[in-house]
Amino acid sequence: MARRAVRTTARFTRAELEHFRGRSIPDLVGPGLKLLFVGINPGLWTAATQTHFAHPGNRFYPALAAAGIIDLPDFASGFTADDRTLFLARGLGISNLVARASARADELTADELRQGAQRLRLNLAVWRPRVVAVVGITAYRTAFSRPKAQQGRQHEALEGAELWVLPNPSGLNAHDTVATLADAYAAPARSAGVLPPA
C-alpha cells in the first residue's frame, strides 16, 4: 500500500464506544482474494471506525507492515476509500467469526463462535481465497471443535483454502510482539503469493 501523510488518531470516550456495542462491520473482501484474515469479532473501536483491527493498541497493521505485507502501519482512525482499494488490490481480505462488536472477545459464547464458523464456511465457498488465517488460537479451537489445535498451518483445508491459525494481535495478548506477529503473519502471506517465497 502506498505511503501517505500520517493522520491523527481518532479519539472516543468510553461512553461513545459503548454506543457501538452489538454493532457489526462489513467483511472486507474483493475479487482475486488470496489471503483472508479472520478475526474473532469486532471491538468497539473497530465498530466505531468501521475498520477491522483499528484499535490503537492492536498490533495487526504494525505486524503486517513489519512483515512487508502492507506499507502503512497505522489505521486507528479508520480506512479511507483509497486504503480499502489498496488493501483489496494486494489480494487481502478481513472477516470475523462473530459479527457483533464487544469490548472483549471473552464476552462471546461458545455457541456464537461455532455458529460463526459455519457462517465463515458458507462465505468461503463464495469468496474462494487461497489461504485463510484465523487470528486467535482459543477462539479457533472453540469455533471449529479442535481443542488440541496448535498455531501454524493446519493439516486440513477449510472449504478448499489452506488453513492457518495465527496469534491474536490484540494488545491484550502479552505473549507476542509486533516482530513475532510479523513472522507468524508472513508465512501464510508467502503461501498465498502475497509475499515472495522466503
Image (cartoon, helix red, strand yellow):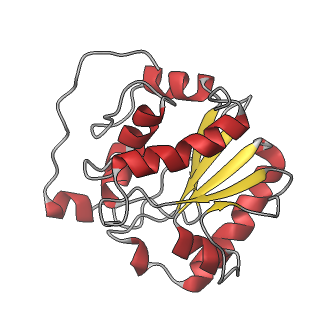
Q: How many marks?
A: 0
Between 64 and 98, which is closer to the camera in this rendering? 64
Q: Is residue 29 visible?
A: no
Left or right of 185 on screen, residue 152: right
Between 183 and 84, which is closer to the camera in this rendering? 183
Q: Position of residue 52 (x, y in %)?
A: 44, 47
Left or right of 47 on screen, residue 137: right
Q: Is residue 120 visible?
A: yes
- For residue 115, what is the image quadrant? bottom right
Q: Position of residue 159 (x, y in %)?
A: 84, 56
Between 136 and 26, which is closer to the camera in this rendering? 136
Q: Position of residue 78 (x, y in %)?
A: 34, 37
Locate the C terminus and report the quarter of the image it occupies.
top right
Q: Position of residue 154 (x, y in %)?
A: 73, 62
Which residue occupies the extreme front position in the image? 198
Which residue occupies the extreme right position in the image? 160
**Residue positioned 48% across, 65% down in the render:** 100
Left or right of 198 on screen, residue 63: left
**Residue positioned 61% across, 22% down in the render:** 89
- For residue 83, what is the image quadrant? top left
